[in-house]
Image: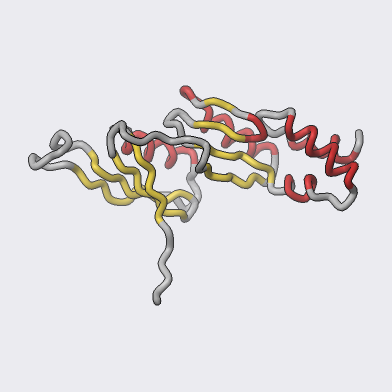
Amino acid sequence: MTSEAFTTCLWFDGKAEEAAAHYLSVFTKDSHLGSVTRYTEAGPGPAGTAITVDFTLNGQRFLALNGGPLFTFNEAISFQIHCADQDEIDYYWDRLTADGGQGGQCGWLKDKFGVSWQVVPTELPALLADPDPQKATRATRAMLAMTKFDLAELRRAHAGE
């Protein structure tokens, strides 16, 4: 049996090219646009419009599909962005909530296309799983009160400051 990489397929209602361009503007490391497949006169969509858009973000392959209004995104699937510091948290949060995106609890957000993301500091699991239950409890309480993560506040809560 041969092992192959995964490609995540995202279903859009006519906005596959717009979504790919947006994500490529946000995720710039090891990211690029691949092929775009377009409808012909045979349909079923208008000739010249995109059926699929292949793109890579941070080395991960995606396929944006213009599948129509039948399916929409929900929070059952989300993408985690592991951030080293507050600048990264702010960068991704601001860009993914721009133009109609919405922040949610505990670092979750929906972008303007309805795709769910988690913008998470890489050290969060260590704060929440601290062997000292008081530190872990304080960090958890702070986390539950946040929308976008404030890394300094999480650290202060963990430390009991």
* Vertical comparison of 118 with 30: above or below: above
Residue 24, quarter of picture? top left
* Vertical comparison of 100 with 52: above or below: above
Pick the quarter of the image with the C terminus.
Answer: top right
Residue 10 position in % (x across, y down): 38, 43
Q: Relative to 80, is 25 on the left or the right?
A: left
Q: Tell me, what colour scheme is on the image?
A: secondary structure
Residue 86 position in % (x across, y down): 69, 37
Residue depicted at 49% across the width and 51% down the height: 58
Badge count: 0
Residue depicted at 49% across the width and 39% down the height: 26
Residue 5, quarter of picture? bottom left
Residue 51 position in % (x across, y down): 24, 42
Q: Relative to 11, is 157 on the left or the right?
A: right
Residue 60 position in % (x across, y down): 46, 54
The one nearer the camera, 158 or 144, is 144
Residue depicted at 12% across the width and 39% down the height: 43
Q: Relative to 85, is 20 on the left or the right?
A: left
